[in-house]
């Protein structure tokens, strides 16, 4: 009953989250990847009329972080404060519009984690026992022998060690059947192949109860009724998704967003936590489940996962400073086929920017506006009736009108890279339309009526494409609307061919500077 009431109240809402990042070293492009994808999706949904809640934050407890702080001669809190400030700065320069930033060291979060633990203990879903088995210290996870992959940690492939400790267990085994049905539903975990992986690697062997406290870890949330134990980092971290909405507090965000459309975007190595452990906890708490967990691939650097420990990361601050925020956002959103791994190289990054942003989008915008100004001056340039239409015009206009629904279809599947492909297909088609219609010849021949139609159609391609590009490259698209001398659209209502747009006093500026790739690679 309670579940239904929550779902009903949540019409037209959209809640999207990134994982909570571990503040344990310098932030790299891999972290930016998930956050930029979620930002583009959140912006798209906002412009598409949804009431959006976009959550990100930091996962600050655990032995790994305490060790790092020690290495840096800092207290754990001092250490995570510095890195949390730094990631907020990164999100600011990357133009990320999140609605809330949660830290697992926030008081309200800690209080709720304790309440959740207490509730689950009192209702018998958590019990005290003894753990003896294998432990992966970097992942802070226990594994049975059957779960190991070639004797090593199934998540990170590192060595595991023997371990014995008194601890609290969560009755994960009780939810085995329900989790299996959920994973087989085909909707909960995307892309599809990840659900198969989960079933084969974890469900088939049977789910064991999960150790959810550590007596050996001090930097964490204390088990409220047995303070020599701290709550396992993953129970602490996963519950952020509801605590940020006021669970065990005013509950306002829960009433509004939980049970509506909820999407967790996570990297492939943490899919297990989000699609087995997290739904089981929610089931135990009697709460609705998220609609989708999307397990994306990794951004690789020369075949290796970028990671702080491997020290091979591309520095997003440096790239943004040097090539601009749109370059980094666009590259991350476009180059990596969502769901799969993608390989980062400076050359591919720079080539992508020159090809799409400079040559295709920037060129179309500057060239078109320059022609309008050259052939018609800077006074008002308005639409036309339905006279003198050619097949090229009709095809172009039809494609302008189809663009929104094509993009929306991909965005509903969280696929930013295909959405961008569609938009750039139209922009490229407009560049080709210039080659075919040859406005300079029309001008030379004095065919002003035809010239007017061609240039107006091109301006409409630019306007509609820029409207749809707003979620992805907010900086450049804002400048396009400044060049067109139009207000920034507040939604997608006008993302279609319009005969009555009034263009005047436009500016033919360079949107993106061409990069000398050879020179950059030599540096
Ligand atoms: N703290 C946990 C998540 C808790 S969520 C309740 C964690 N943190 S992490 O900092 O290690 O990773 C956070 C996210 O960043 C993960 O989704 C991970 O896949 C992502 N990435 C880290 N490096 C990455 C790449 N090189 N490429 C793409 N994503 C990567 O796990």
Image (cartoon, rainbow, N blue to C red):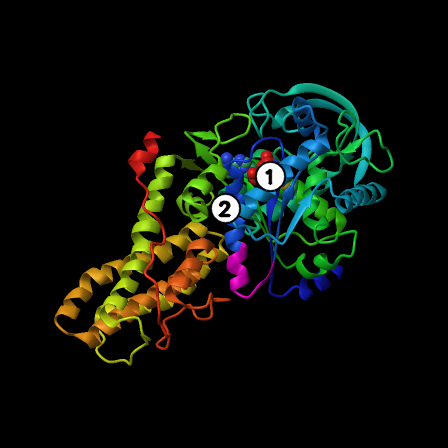
Q: Nearer the viewer, residue 309 or 130?
A: 309
| Residue 452 percent across, percent down from the top left | 24, 73
Residue 143 showing in the rendered view: no
Quadrant of residue 137 in the image? top right
Which residue, as the protein is rendered here, is positioned at the far top? 162
Residue span colored magenta = 42-52
Instruction: Please name the residue that numbered disc 1 is placed on.
Output: 86
Give me the residue at 75% from left, 27% from top: 217
Q: Tell me where residue 141 sits by quadrant.
A: top right
The residue carrying mark 1 has its beta carbon less than 8 Å from ligand 1: no
Q: Position of residue 23 (x, y in %)?
A: 63, 34
| 497 shown above or below 91 | below
Q: Residue 176: within the magenta?
A: no
Q: How many marks?
A: 2
Q: Which mark is residue 191?
A: 2
Q: Quadrant of the N terminus?
A: bottom right
Give the x, y percent position of residue 281: 72, 44
Between marks 1 and 2 in the image, the one whose residue lies nearer the viewer = 1
Label 1: few (<14), some (14–19) or many (≥20) C-alpha neighbours in 10 Å: some
**Is residue 47 within the magenta segment?**
yes
Disc ID at residue 197: none
Which SS class for mark 1? Answer: helix
């Amino acid at each position: 009953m309670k579940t239904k009431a929550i779902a009903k109240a949540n019409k037209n809402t959209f809640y999207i989250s990134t994982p909570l990042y571990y503040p344990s070293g310098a932030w790299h492009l891999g972290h930016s990847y998930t956050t930029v994808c979620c930002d583009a999706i959140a912006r798209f949904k906002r412009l598409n009329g949804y009431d959006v809640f976009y959550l990100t934050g930091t996962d600050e407890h655990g032995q790994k972080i305490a060790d790092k702080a020690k290495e840096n001669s800092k207290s754990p809190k001092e250490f995570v404060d510095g890195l949390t400030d730094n990631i907020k700065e990164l999100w600011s320069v990357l133009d990320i519009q999140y609605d809330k930033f949660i830290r697992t060291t926030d008081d309200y979060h800690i209080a709720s984690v304790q309440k959740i633990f207490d509730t689950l203990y009192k209702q018998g879903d958590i019990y005290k026992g003894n753990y003896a088995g294998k432990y992966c210290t970097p992942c802070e996870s226990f594994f049975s022998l059957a779960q190991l992959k070639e004797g090593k940690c199934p998540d990170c492939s590192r060595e595991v060690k023997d371990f014995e400790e008194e601890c609290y267990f969560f009755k994960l085994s009780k939810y085995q059947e329900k989790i299996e049905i959920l994973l087989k539903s085909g909707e909960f975990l995307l892309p599809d192949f990840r659900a198969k992986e989960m079933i084969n690697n974890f469900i088939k062997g049977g789910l064991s109860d999960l150790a959810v406290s550590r007596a050996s870890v001090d930097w964490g949330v204390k088990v409220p009724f047995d303070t020599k134990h701290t709550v396992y980092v993953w129970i602490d971290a996963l519950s952020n998704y509801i605590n940020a909405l006021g669970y065990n507090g005013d509950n306002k965000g829960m009433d509004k967003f939980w049970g509506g459309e909820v999407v967790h975007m996570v990297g492939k190595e943490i899919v297990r936590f989000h699609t087995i452990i997290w739904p089981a906890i929610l089931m135990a708490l009697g709460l609705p489940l998220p609609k989708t967990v999307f397990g994306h691939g990794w951004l690789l650097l020369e075949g290796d996962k970028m990671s702080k420990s491997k020290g091979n990361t591309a520095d997003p601050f440096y790239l943004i400073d040097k090539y601009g925020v749109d370059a980094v956002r666009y590259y991350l959103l476009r180059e990596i086929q969502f769901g799969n791994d993608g390989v980062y190289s400076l050359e591919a990054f720079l080539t992508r920017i020159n090809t799409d942003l400079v040559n295709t989008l920037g060129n179309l915008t500057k060239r078109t506006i320059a022609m309008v100004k050259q052939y018609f001056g800077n006074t008002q340039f308005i639409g036309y009736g339905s006279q003198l239409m050619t097949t090229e015009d009709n095809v172009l206009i039809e494609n302008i009108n189809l663009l929104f629904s094509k993009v929306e279809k991909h965005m509903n599947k969280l696929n930013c890279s295909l959405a961008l492909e569609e938009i750039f297909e139209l922009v490229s088609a407009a560049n080709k339309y210039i080659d075919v219609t040859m406005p300079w010849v029309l001008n030379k021949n004095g065919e002003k009526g035809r010239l007017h139609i061609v240039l107006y159609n091109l301006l409409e391609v630019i306007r509609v494409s820029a409207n749809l590009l707003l979620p992805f490259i907010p900086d450049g698209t804002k400048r396009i609307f400044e060049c067109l001398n139009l207000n920034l659209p507040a939604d997608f209502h006008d993302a279609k061919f319009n005969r009555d747009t009034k263009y005047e006093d436009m500016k033919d500026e360079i949107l993106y500077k061409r990069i000398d790739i050879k020179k950059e690679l030599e540096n």
